Amino acid sequence: MSLILVIGFLKAYGQTDVKNSKDYYLLDRMPNYHIISYNETAFDAHSFFIENKKTPIEGKKFSIKYQHGKSDDKNFEFPTRLQILRNYSNAIKKAGGEIVSERYNSEWGHYTFKTTNAKEIWVEVKTSISAKTYTVTVIERQTMKQEIAINAELIKNKIELEGKIAIYGIYFDVGKSIIKKESESALLQISEYLRRNKAINCWVVGHTDSDGSFELNSKLSLERAKAIKKHLQEKYGIASNRLFAEGVGPLAPVASNNTEEGKKLNRRVELVKKQ
């Protein structure tokens, strides 16, 4: 369905999109629907079903809610929920996308997709029971840029939301576990978070990229985690029974190791809430 035809339908029904809204550029809307709610944020999270488990995906977020132009007409026969979902799933598959999960029950039709168009894109389509409205949520996946200064409040919010936070402000020389002095700002904020939240215990988890052998990377990631734990104990007085060091080497990447940018994102320390 071309944009011109969509506009024609909207005019025929006397409906217009809410101000400053737009379709996501890769996805055409269903005929006769207009946008009643639109939100775009530079960095946010949304949970997608992956292997029957809700998993938060982070990045630039778009949330677009559509309503049919005849929504007040009791005698009008609306598209079915399944019809809306199939239109989107077919379009995404034709574009080379992958269906990650499908959910369909008495309350919502729920599909999750992943596709790649120079970036990783996740799409969720949810319809109302009547199919008079439906919502498209899109995440252009990315890792939060560390220009956002790490602070104790951000650590608290991320751990409450996801149970963990990736810290990119702790630095080491290549192949070594000695903490560099420019890491102090991030370590201070971690200690501040732990002081303010005395009931919280955490894993300090070291991660590496895939360069080098698995054995060396595993050892290095553990040594770095231990160094951070020791620093927080000795300089900031965090009790030893609140921190648990572990290293997983290259086993949990957040990006491809085929690019330098991806490797940079994979070299990180994560603070994980210990249940």
Image (cartoon, grey):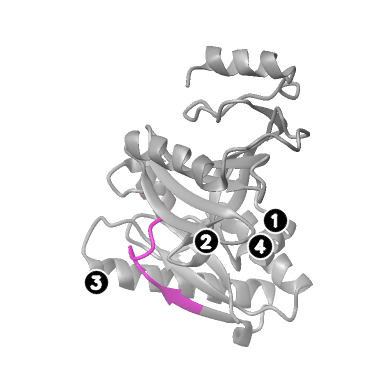
- Kindly indicate the quadrant of the structure image that contains residue 242: bottom right
Helix, strand or loop for disc 2: strand
| Crowd tier of the residue under label 2, counting other residues whose Cα lies within 10 Å: few below 14, some 14–19, many 20 or above | some
Helix, strand or loop for disc 1: helix
Residue 179 visible in the snapshot: yes
Three-letter residue code for mark 3: Glu
Q: Position of residue 60 (x, y in %)?
A: 57, 39
Question: Mark 4 or mark 3, which has the lower sequence index?
Answer: 4
- Kindly indicate the quadrant of the structure image that contains residue 190: bottom right
Disc 3 marks which residue?
215
Question: Mark 3 or mark 2, which has the lower sequence index?
Answer: 2
Q: CA distance from mark 3 to mark 2?
A: 29 Å
Disc 4 marks which residue?
161
Q: Which residues are magenta?
A: 245-255
Say which mark, if any, is on residue 154: 1
Q: CA distance from mark 4 to mark 3?
A: 33 Å
Three-letter residue code for mark 4: Leu
Q: Give whichever of 89, 188 is nearer the camera.
A: 89
The residue furthest left is 213
Q: Position of residue 140 (x, y in %)?
A: 50, 39
Three-letter residue code for mark 2: Thr
Residue 50 higher or lower than 67, as above or below: below
Q: Position of residue 268 (x, y in %)?
A: 46, 58
Three-letter residue code for mark 1: Leu
Q: CA distance from mark 1 to mark 4?
A: 11 Å
Disc 2 marks which residue?
55
